[in-house]
Image (tube, helix red, strand yellow):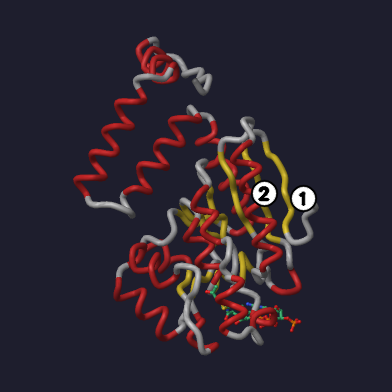
């Protein structure tokens, strides 16, 4: 696929996707989301890639779904064609870790996209919000569902009902982002985190992601049972043998993804 709205690069074992509609603050139209889905799936299939990073510009990760594109949609356009959000949940099908590196605005669909990633590293200037209510609509890509799980019902209600933005410090305090870094170091620090992950065993990385995500889909006892099955299955890998042997021999592990 030829990309018009994103940039796609490989940095060692990390796939880097940069949202690239600077004139529209990376507003997310269907074309961009099709490209993003395609690029994510290609990295997921690529055996040389172990982790994926999605980022935007210094001013905006993404300022939401493209308001100009959807302003005149009718209910039938939106419903029949599943416009705006038709392939968003594809991001959740990616089995390798996806990190959002967020600088500037992550609003509406931009905040929802960041929340669909596995974790968020924020620059000091990051601003998160669900301002759809000001447009006479509501979050349509999981905001009303993922925000309460990420930051509590009270803060989620506050943000979705008042449309106020949350800065990086508040977002970290609330648990929405995992860490805050200086703006000029956002990509460097995020790639460092991605490379740390990429140095682990790929099948185990995928099991960890799978197991943590179960926590959002099931009960505690079912989730613990799921984790235990994966934990036991890790003993069927060469990498578990190598990891534990390397520890006992006081040397770095040399994982082979088997
Ligand atoms: N869609 C389309 N275009 C957008 C956009 C969006 N979501 N956000 C910004 N732009 C465009 C602006 O129209 C403007 O284009 P022009 O130069 O051609 O006029 C350009 O990006 C720069 O934006 P501003 O001039 O507004 O920049 P600013 O610095 O003054 O303000 C901002 C920045 C506060 C982010 C402001 O642009 C803004 O409020 N944007 C809209 C945010 C929003 O409401 N997002 C939710 C969208 S709905 C949604 O996402 C639904 C869903 O859940 C899936």
In contact (CB < 8 Å): disc 1 and disc 2:
yes
Q: Earlier in the sequence, mark 1 or mark 2?
A: 1
Front-lying residue, 212 or 102: 212
Q: Quadrant of ligand 1?
A: bottom right
Residue positioned 70% across, 40% down in the render: 10
Q: Quadrant of residue 195?
A: top right
Q: Marks 1 and 2: which is nearer the front?
A: 1
Q: Is residue 93 left or right of residue 147?
A: right
Q: Sort mark 2 into few (<14), some (14-19) or many (20+) by Cα contacts within 10 Å.
A: many
Measuring from the top left, give residue 169's x and y in whole percent. 43, 66
Disc 1 from disc 2: Cα separation: 9 Å
Front-lying residue, 150 or 96: 96
Measuring from the top left, give residue 206's x and y in whole percent. 46, 36
Identify the element where label 2 is drawn: helix
Identify the element where label 1 is drawn: loop
Q: Sort mark 1 into few (<14), some (14-19) or many (20+) by Cα contacts within 10 Å.
A: few
Q: Is residue 51 above or below residue 187?
A: above
**Label placed on residue 1:** 1
Measuring from the top left, give residue 50's x and y in whole percent. 57, 35
Q: Is residue 173 above or below residue 225?
A: below
Residue positioned 67% across, 59% down in the render: 34
Q: Is residue 67 left or right of residue 51?
A: right
Dot 2 corresponds to which residue? 39
Measuring from the top left, give residue 105's x and y in whole percent. 58, 71
For this orientation, the residue located farthest to the top is 249
């Amino acid at each position: 696929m030829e990309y018009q709205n994103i940039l796609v690069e490989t940095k060692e074992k990390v796939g880097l996707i940069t949202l690239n509609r600077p004139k529209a603050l990376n507003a997310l139209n269907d074309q961009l989301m099709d490209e993003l889905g395609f690029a994510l799936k290609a990295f997921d299939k690529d055996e040389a890639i172990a982790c994926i990073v999605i980022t935007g510009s210094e001013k905006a990760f993404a300022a939401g779904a493209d308001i100009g594109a959807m302003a005149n949609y009718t209910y039938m356009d939106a419903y029949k064609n599943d416009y705006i959000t038709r392939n968003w949940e594809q991001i959740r099908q990616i089995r390798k870790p996806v990190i959002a590196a967020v600088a500037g605005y992550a609003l509406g669909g931009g905040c929802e996209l960041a929340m669909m990633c596995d974790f968020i590293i924020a620059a000091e200037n990051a601003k998160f919000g669900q301002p759809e209510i000001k447009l006479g609509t509501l979050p349509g890509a999981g905001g009303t569902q993922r925000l309460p799980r990420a930051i509590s019902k009270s803060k989620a209600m506050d943000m979705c009902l008042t449309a106020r933005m949350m800065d990086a410090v508040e977002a970290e305090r609330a648990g929405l982002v995992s860490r805050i870094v200086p703006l000029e170091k956002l990509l460097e620090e995020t790639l460092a985190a991605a490379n740390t992950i990429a140095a682990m065993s790929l099948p185990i990385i995928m099991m960890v992601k799978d197991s943590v995500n179960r926590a959002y889909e099931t009960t505690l006892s079912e989730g613990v049972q799921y984790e235990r099955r994966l934990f036991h299955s890790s003993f069927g890998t060469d990498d578990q043998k190598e990891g534990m042997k390397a520890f006992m021999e006081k040397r770095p592990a040399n994982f082979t993804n088997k």
